[in-house]
Amino acid sequence: MGKCVFVTVGTTRFDQLIETIVQDSNVLQALVDCLHIDKLILQIGNSQMPSHDNISIPIEYYKYKDSIENDIQQADLVISHAGAGTILQTLEAHKPLLVVVNEKLMNNHQLEIAHEMEKQGYLFHCTCSTLATTLRKFVNHKFKQYEKGNPLLFGQYLNEIMS
Amino acid sequence: MNQKKTISTLIVLGSGGHTTEMFRLLSGTDLNVYKPRYYTIASTDTMSAKKMKEFEQNTLDDMNVSFINRSRHVGQSYFSSIFTTLWAFFTVIPLVYRIRPKLILINGPGTCIPIVIASLLLSLFFLIDRPKIVFVESICRVQSLSLSGKILQYLPVHILVQWPQLTEIYPKTQYIGRLV
């Protein structure tokens, strides 16, 4: 059975991430040699797709889908932008997650959640320039299992203040 | 007939991730108690309208929706947003007066501040009973409150945060667990 990595940028444009994945030979080497990945699926949103003729493993890409749930479920590793929605969706699916922070977005408070989730042991985060080295940390690494938030607590809280 | 008391609830949908979080929160509430549910959605926000239809597809009798102009677009300057916020404020006064919510749920940017101020003013002049207002800060906020959260600290609003460290910085906020 082959292993698959799913890269997702949400509704943003993140050219640098897509470029790094497709064109940085160190990244590809880390994926193939260290993590035994043999297929790439990319959700690129508004990003440009650079030329990828030289890449040695099968690659699929698309702009958007109504739901990326299937691609997350199929993946053995998810590489994501720092959007909270994607982070939560991937952690709830209990998939290994690498969050790549877009340094070009100033005042990006979404960085906070990536940083905190790493501190708690749920994921790793990095920038495009440290992507290859951070990928190597996934070898034999076990993340803490993420517990989904509990909206019932909110329902109980409302019942209390409204009674 | 012994029916449960219902609570008319005004739900302000922000946009994008805020709307996603709001429906996760609502999934933990008793929809037979918190009804009718009145949603407000920014007129340009098709994604929130779609999510609302999905969530309410079996309960259409218990809900209602109003589309209103957005008080602040992403990237808009704070200065010009003062005027659009004022405009939004005058458009939501008749809305809140008509709905007379007992509970207002907010979690995002957009029109939530004008709606809070409109409802507090209306109750100050005894035109409506003062509603309970609950603001839930986004799970994205780990180290500081959003602009909406910071403003709401100074108003009679219940503020829930989803990371415990925030309650140390902002004593008016409460942490009851991670909710979404």
Image: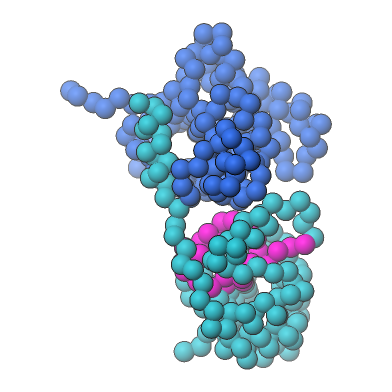
Chain colours: A cyan, B blue
Q: Is residue B95 visible?
A: no
Q: Quadrant of residue B26?
A: top left
Q: Nearer the viewer, residue A85 or B137?
A: B137
| Magenta stretch: includes residue B25 | no
- Residue at the location (42% across, 50% down)? A150
Quarter in which the C terminus of chain A is drawn: top left
Q: Nearer the viewer, residue B40 or A107?
A: A107
Quarter of the figure with residue B89: top right
From the top left corner, tell me how far across and down residue A18 is, in percent.
71, 72
Q: Is residue A155 visible?
A: yes
Q: Is residue B138 above or below residue A113?
A: above
Percent position of residue A30, x then y = 66, 86
Confirm whether the magenta stretch covers residue A98: yes
Question: As rendered, which of A83 and A48 lies closer to the eye?
Answer: A83
* Residue positioned 79% across, 60% down in the render: A104
Task: Quadrant for residue A161, please give it.
Answer: top left
In the rendered image, residue A50, in percent from the top left (x then y), is placed at 76, 76
Magenta segment boundaries in residue numbering: A78-103
Residue furthest to the front in view is: B168
